[in-house]
Amino acid sequence: MKYGISSVVVAALVLLSPIASATPPAQPPRVGIDTTFGDRFHEAVSALRLKHYQDAIAKANVALAMQPDDTNAALLFIVRGTAYFWLKEEAGAWADLKAASQRDPKIKNARDKLGWLNYRRGNYQDAVADFTAFLPGAKDPGYIYYQRAEAYKKLGQSELVRRDFLRVTQAPVLQAMGYAERGVAFGEVGDYRSAERDFAKAKRMDSSDAHTLNTVAWFHSTAPLAASRNGRAAVQDATKACRYSKWKNPDFIDTLAAAYAETANFGDAVAYEKQAIALETNLKERKGLQEHLALFEKGRPVREDPTIK
């Protein structure tokens, strides 16, 4: 997801705070099973909260080998899947978070991450279901409505897209990225003045957040309405996003390419798009970048589809 979900990846998610306080239910010891399961469970959670992701995976593996019940297994799959998520091991993260939702559907922890992973895999209906499941009690509902709107957009459900973007514009904002996303939402529903106001707030709140800068730059590079595009500003913001991410994020470099295309500098657009393609490991995302490259090679910029009427 260009605006929010790939930014999702880092900015607006939190580390399993509900899980951290979870205590495995008391159970009578079972023959052949290590009764120190509770210790292993909490060691895995503690490692995750300390961002010791490899250790969290190892501790979760030990606990899972003790054959816990479905609820505790689901929590451990979430711990291990979240560790894989932050390590950017998407296949492992998706498999574990999917297993968690199947073991105990009542547990909603990390369904936002599973939604993003399903979006990345092209499972848009599953992504909608995941975001919907995560919404009750979400600390930042605007963020989740934003992600769900993007999934609805892929499904061509324009009225549901509009409804969720309107919800984003009405939700409280907790961080700079939230203002950037709300700005996009205002743009999607045609309120461009409010969009620019939120973009300015986002950059004032955190002028060095790469995800915020990328979101604003993409909008200014690709907005359907000409009056909302600003190629020069987009190049500046996208360049900063790339610099702050050490030129390792293909999504941000793709945005920089789109920004140069908006200024009619297709030579640099092609060069940066090729750089983005070389870095992208997700085949579905790479296909999208290759489509952008084809446009630039023909001297055409990227334009977001105006799906909101």
Image (tube, grey):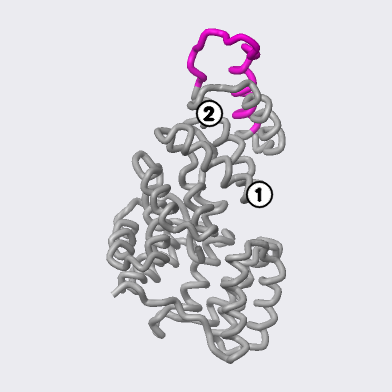
The residue closer to the viewer here, 31 or 281, is 31
Amino acid type, callout 2: Ala
Report which quarter residue 280 is drawn in. bottom right
| Left or right of 50 on screen, residue 211 | left
**How far from the left and from the top, in percent, is residue 231?**
52, 82
Whether residue 293 appears in magenta in the rendering, the answer is: no
Q: Which residues are magenta?
A: 23-47
Q: Is residue 139 above or below residue 159?
A: above
Badge 1 element: loop
Report which quarter residue 257 is drawn in. bottom right
Q: Is residue 258 above or below residue 74?
A: below
**How far from the left and from the top, in percent, is residue 135?**
36, 45
- The residue beneath circle 1 is 89
- The residue beneath circle 2 is 20
Badge 2 element: helix
The residue closer to the viewer here, 247 or 205, is 247
Crowd around label 1: few <14 · some 14–19 · many ≥20 (10 Å):
few
Q: Is residue 137 among the parts visible in the rendering?
A: yes
Residue beneath the point at 43% across and 52% down: 126
Amino acid type, callout 1: Glu
Q: Quadrant of the C terminus?
A: bottom left
Q: Outermost residue toward the front?
A: 31
Closer to the observer: label 1 or label 2? 1
Crowd around label 2: few <14 · some 14–19 · many ≥20 (10 Å):
some
Nearest to N terminus: mark 1 or mark 2: 2
Q: Is residue 244 among the parts visible in the rendering?
A: no
**How far from the left and from the top, in percent, is residue 167?**
30, 56
